[in-house]
Amino acid sequence: MKFPFKKEKKVIFQKVGKQQGFTLENQDRKLSDFTDTDIEDYLYDMFDSSDQFVILTAPEPQGKVRYIQSCTHDGEIEVELGIEEKGTCLYYKMCSEEECRRIFLDFYYNRFVPDMGEYKPVEF
């Protein structure tokens, strides 16, 4: 994990380096060889436990989206997008289990086009 640096309220992370393929990660393990079923399994584990998170990172940015990460807060699901520009900025929205699942699978199949009007910058 790269340390962020502040630029006003928005936090900007260093860009993720190019990689061979997708990676799927939670707090227990990181996979580089997986299927969409593994993504769904990771998400279902996260939906059932507030201690879980899921990160799906693309080999290269897809329409500026480098990775998607998600966790639960007080029974709600937060999805964050890592948007690459000069650095990587996080944007989030709250969503349902089904929408979260769709976002992850669409990103995995390179057909995710976020409506950025639905997302807010993550601020610290």
Image (cartoon, rainbow, N blue to C red):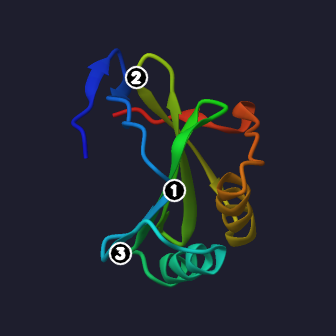
Amino acid type, callout 3: Asp
- Observer-side mark, 2 or 3, equals 2
- Quadrant of the rendered image containing residue 43: bottom right
Type of residue at label 1? Answer: Phe
Position of residue 79 measured from the top left corner of the image (x, y, whole percent) = 57, 54
Q: Secondary structure at mark 1?
A: loop
Place residue 44 in its image quadrant.
Answer: bottom right
Q: Are marks 1 and 3 in contact (CB under 8 Å)?
A: no
In front of the other: label 2 or label 1? 1
Q: Amino acid at mark 2?
A: Gly
* Count of labels in the image: 3
Residue at left offset 69%, top offset 56% = 103
Q: Residue furthest left?
A: 3
From this view, report whether residue 15 is shown above or below residue 72. Answer: above
- Residue bearing mark 1: 22
Q: Is residue 35 left or right of residue 87?
A: right
CA distance separating discs 1 and 3: 23 Å
Q: Which residue is mark 2?
A: 87
Q: CA distance from mark 2 to mark 3?
A: 28 Å
Q: Residue at x 33, y 34 (%)?
A: 124
Residue pointed to by mark 3: 51
Q: Residue at x 25, y 47 (%)?
A: 1
**Looking at this view, is 91 or 68 the one in front?**
68
Categorize mark 1 by other alpha carbons within 10 Å: few (<14), some (14-19), many (20+). some
User: Residue 39's x, y, as percent?
Assistant: 58, 73
